[in-house]
Image: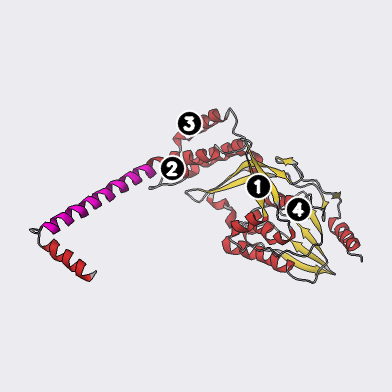
Amino acid sequence: MENVSLFCYNQLRNPHKKGCAIMKKVLLGCLGTVLVLLALLIGFLAYFGPDYGIFLFPPSPQDYARSVVKKLDFGLYTDKDWENEKKKALEKLGSAKTYQDTYPVLEELTKEAGGKHSYFLSPQDNPENSPESKNQPEVQNREGILYLKVPAFTGDAQATKAYAKKLSAALKRDDYQAVLVDLRDNTGGNMYPMIAGLSSLLPDEDLFQFVYKNGSKSAVSRLDILQQLGLEQTDEKAKKVQIAVLINGKTGSSGEMTVLAFKGLENVKIFGQPTASYTTGNNYYQLYDGAVLLLTTSSILDRTGKLYENEAIQPDIQTDQPLEEAESWLKGQIGE
């Protein structure tokens, strides 16, 4: 290889040699092709990129807004009037001078496209900056009943895995005879660490399905949840035990999705009050300036065949004292 390189070098230094001339032409031809392809790629990204949130240069407020509106097309409630709503909104945005100027119109349009469970959040309101980003589960052994407090959560990747692993580690122990999953006041966030941490309690089947406005469905299994977080897939299961789930009027969004992962299982009973009724599926979009779009794109079908579209989940036992009644029921199940 060194001899070949030396030969080429010597040939390039001597333009009178035929081999050098040929090689120069080949190199120049390759370089020209690369430059043409690069120019085409830049042109393609410059023209189509903003529709997908890809900007080679800082976008104007109008281009920024158009990229958000493109995503809103997938909202669950974009009906036949949607095109008119978009047109009106884009006309209003024509005078925007900053990204911040677009926020009020985009907030309103987001609600039109996705309903009450959809949000356009400024960079200051990014969920990753919220107090819930630092939440972690609470684990107690209450006289043979494994108590798991599962709070709202919006943390980063490292905190997400720590959240899930704290729950899964507790379920690997052998010092309990029943499980109590407390989802009261869990207002949502990221459902994946919640369900992943509890996944050893769940069967190898579809937990629920997302149902989109065109009628298509996307099933979610426990293995899908683990893959989403990059956690190790395992067939290891917790002990087959009776499970009580606690809910209240502040159990919402991802908290409700975690409830639905258990609803309909024969060894599960749900105690408390109806949930907050944010039972739809959301897509998460990080925007150019650090703002966030949370857009409802689907309703939810549970394992019993019930379809939810921002409808409250009803408890099996409606009570104002869910913890006491759940513990009493579990103790009865384990023979105390």
Q: How far apart are marks 1 and 2 (CA)?
A: 31 Å
Instruction: Give the label on residue 50, or none.
Output: 2
Real-space Cα separation, disc 3 to disc 1, in angstroms: 39 Å
Which element carries disc 4, helix, strand or loop? helix
Front of the two marks 1 and 2: 1
* Label ID, residue 6: none
What residue is drawn where x is 73% and y is 40%?
A: 307
**Label 4 packing within 10 angstroms: few (<14), some (14-19), many (20+):** many
Amino acid at pointer 1: Ala
Tell me the SS state at disc 2.
helix
Q: Where is residue 105, by image quadrant?
A: top right
Disc nearer the start of the sequence (2/4): 2
Q: Which of marks 3 and 1 is nearer the N terminus?
A: 3
Spatial distance from mark 3 to mark 4, Cα to Cα? 46 Å
Q: From the top left corner, tell me how far across and down residue 140 is, in percent.
A: 78, 68
Please tell me whether residue 270 is drawn above or below residue 230 in the rendered image. above
Q: Name the residue under label 1.
A: 219
User: Magenta region's main secondary structure?
Assistant: helix
Residue 266 place in picture, x, y as percent: 82, 53
Gap between marks 2 and 4, in whole Å? 41 Å
Asked whether residue 65 is drawn in magenta, I would say no
Quadrant (top left, top right, bottom left, bottom right) of the N terminus: bottom left
Q: Which residue carries the number 3 mark?
A: 91
Among numbered discs 3 and 2, the one appearing first in the sequence: 2
Which residue does the numbered mark 4 point to in the structure image?
A: 262
Residue 245 image point, x, y percent: 79, 56
Q: Residues within 10 Å of mark 2 (few under 14, many from 20)?
A: many
